[in-house]
């Protein structure tokens, strides 16, 4: 998520293969912390921010006659099968007739938005997530996209992406997606080891994934991402290295390598995972380092956090040009813009506010039945929030921060305003994660792998909160 008023910093070096942090440094900074798809993070949202406040934000955009394009996120909550590791908002069902009423309610939600914003707002980015969007049949996907195109103007060259469950997709479905304008796919791979797949209740063969990857390439999708998870039950260093090697041979355009966070008290499906089957923390650390080394050696560029991309992928190009952004869907090539969130539990941004829809279908449907936008919580950002967001996103996306950029954009003295944070950076500099001088802060190549720890220094909420158990660990 870029910040208006800030210049793009110089790009970070693409080849980080010789700059992995030491195991000791990784272990030292393996602390709980946010992923910073926003700042402040969603755990800071309050119920005092509801539909009225959100309508005010929509009205303000309309009153400003903003011509800036929107990003749109649509949440499809349904899944046919439960994955035990999953922490997403989902509804497990094999009853596909439940999709039709959900799509009807999505149309109602869009209508409430266009009543305030007007029709034909421009869209530069659209993402379908879940749950599993490929729970929808081809005719349902056509109906959904038709409804969106009737209400919004999808710009030429817009990024249209969708999350794909290989078990519920087919080459024919990919043909439909391409015809509907989708140009990016994200396939949920997680792990190829049969024992691990059984332990997490997600069985899919490398051959199945390869068939879809081949179909995507034949149909001309711009980019295909694989999601992987390390730290799953029954995983070993050797088994995960085999998965990484298989993935490298398949050579998707992007790869995301996420750490599994075992939080059974918060996520009921994870209670089916036996803690004794999880790899030890030291083994999990070695999995991460092995994956990083293998992907870098295979020619992938480290984008940030958990993300890697081939050098010619748009994410890698945006990183080289200093034009990388970050929003609720993760790293993005799209400029900073308002995010319209549609569907149950969806999170969005409008102006200097964040908002989230009702988390259950009953609440979501009830609000729309009564003609209300289904927003149940959110946050209006303070000036301090906006300044800190600019700092954190510059570090997360560009890997460096120029004090003068902040001083000019927000009419402030950075060193004075962030005096406490400046002192806290000393530990990170001693560990080789950042370099500071009178002009700014630069995240070192090694520090890029621990950039969440760097960003946390400037997070006022985390620093004031001694209980960080609400977050997953950095690794």
Image (cartoon, helix red, strand yellow):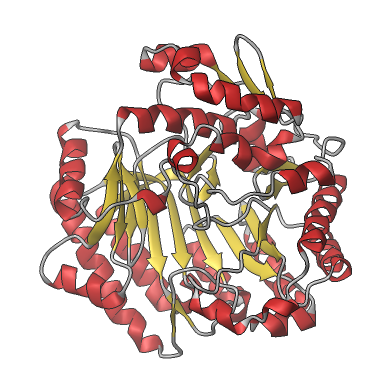
Depicted 134 relative to depicted 427: above or below: below
Q: Residue furthest top?
A: 438
Depicted 307 relative to depicted 150: above or below: above
Q: Position of residue 33 (x, y in %)?
A: 56, 48
Q: Position of residue 220 (x, y in %)?
A: 63, 57
Q: Residue furthest front?
A: 466
Q: Residue furthest bottom?
A: 95
Q: Is residue 203 shown to the viewer in this render?
A: no
Q: Position of residue 396 (x, y in %)?
A: 58, 36
Residue at (52% x, 52% y) in the render: 468
Residue at (36% x, 55% y) in the render: 347
Q: Nearer the viewer, residue 168 or 362?
A: 362
Q: Nearer the viewer, residue 151 or 60?
A: 60
Q: Say whether residue 101 is left or right of residue 333.
A: left
Depicted 120 relative to depicted 395: above or below: below
Q: Say whether residue 26 is left or right of residue 393.
A: right
Q: Is residue 366 shown to the viewer in this render?
A: yes
């Amino acid at each position: 998520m870029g910040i208006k008023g800030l210049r793009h910093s110089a790009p970070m070096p693409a080849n980080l293969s010789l700059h992995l942090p030491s195991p000791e440094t990784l272990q030292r900074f393996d602390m709980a912390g946010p992923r910073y798809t926003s700042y402040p993070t969603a755990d800071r949202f309050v119920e005092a921010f509801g539909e009225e406040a959100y309508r005010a934000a929509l009205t303000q955009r309309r009153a400003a006659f903003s011509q800036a394009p929107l990003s749109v996120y649509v949440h499809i909550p349904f899944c046919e099968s439960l994955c035990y590791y999953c922490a997403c908002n989902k509804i497990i069902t094999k009853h596909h007739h439940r999709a039709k009423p959900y799509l009807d309610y999505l149309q109602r939600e869009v209508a409430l938005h266009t009543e305030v914003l007007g029709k034909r707002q421009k869209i530069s980015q659209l993402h379908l997530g879940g749950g599993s969007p490929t729970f929808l049949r081809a005719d349902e996907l056509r109906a959904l996209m038709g409804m969106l195109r009737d209400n919004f103007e999808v710009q030429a060259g817009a990024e249209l992406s969708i999350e794909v469950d290989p078990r519920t997709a087919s080459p024919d479905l990919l043909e439909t997606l391409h015809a509907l304008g989708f140009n990016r796919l994200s396939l949920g791979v997680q792990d190829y080891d049969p024992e691990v797949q059984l332990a997490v209740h997600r069985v899919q063969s490398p051959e199945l994934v390869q068939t879809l990857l081949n179909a995507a390439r034949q149909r001309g999708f711009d980019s295909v991402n694989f999601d992987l998870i390390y730290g799953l039950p029954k995983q070993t260093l050797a088994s995960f290295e085999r998965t990484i090697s298989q993935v490298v041979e398949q050579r998707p355009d992007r790869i995301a390598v996420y750490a599994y966070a075992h939080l059974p008290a918060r996520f009921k499906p994870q209670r089916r995972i036996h803690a004794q089957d999880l790899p030890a923390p030291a083994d999990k650390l070695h999995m991460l380092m092995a994956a990083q080394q293998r992907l870098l050696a295979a020619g992938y560029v480290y984008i940030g956090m958990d993300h890697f991309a081939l050098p010619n992928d748009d994410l890698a190009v945006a990183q080289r040009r200093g034009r990388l952004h970050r929003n609720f869907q993760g790293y993005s090539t799209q400029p900073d813009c308002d995010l319209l969130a549609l569907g149950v539990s969806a999170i969005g941004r409008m102006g200097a506010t964040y908002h989230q829809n009702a988390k259950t279908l009953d609440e979501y449907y009830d609000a729309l039945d009564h003609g209300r936008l289904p927003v149940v919580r959110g946050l209006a950002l303070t000036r301090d929030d906006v300044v800190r967001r600019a700092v954190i996103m510059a570090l997360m996306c560009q890997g460096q921060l120029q004090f003068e950029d902040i001083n000019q954009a927000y009419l402030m003295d950075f060193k004075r305003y962030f005096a406490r944070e400046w002192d806290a950076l000393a530990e990170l500099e001693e560990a080789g994660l950042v370099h500071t001088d009178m002009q700014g802060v630069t995240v070192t190549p090694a520090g890029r792998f621990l950039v969440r720890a760097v960003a946390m220094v400037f997070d006022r909420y985390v620093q004031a909160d001694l209980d960080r158990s609400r977050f997953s660990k950095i690794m």
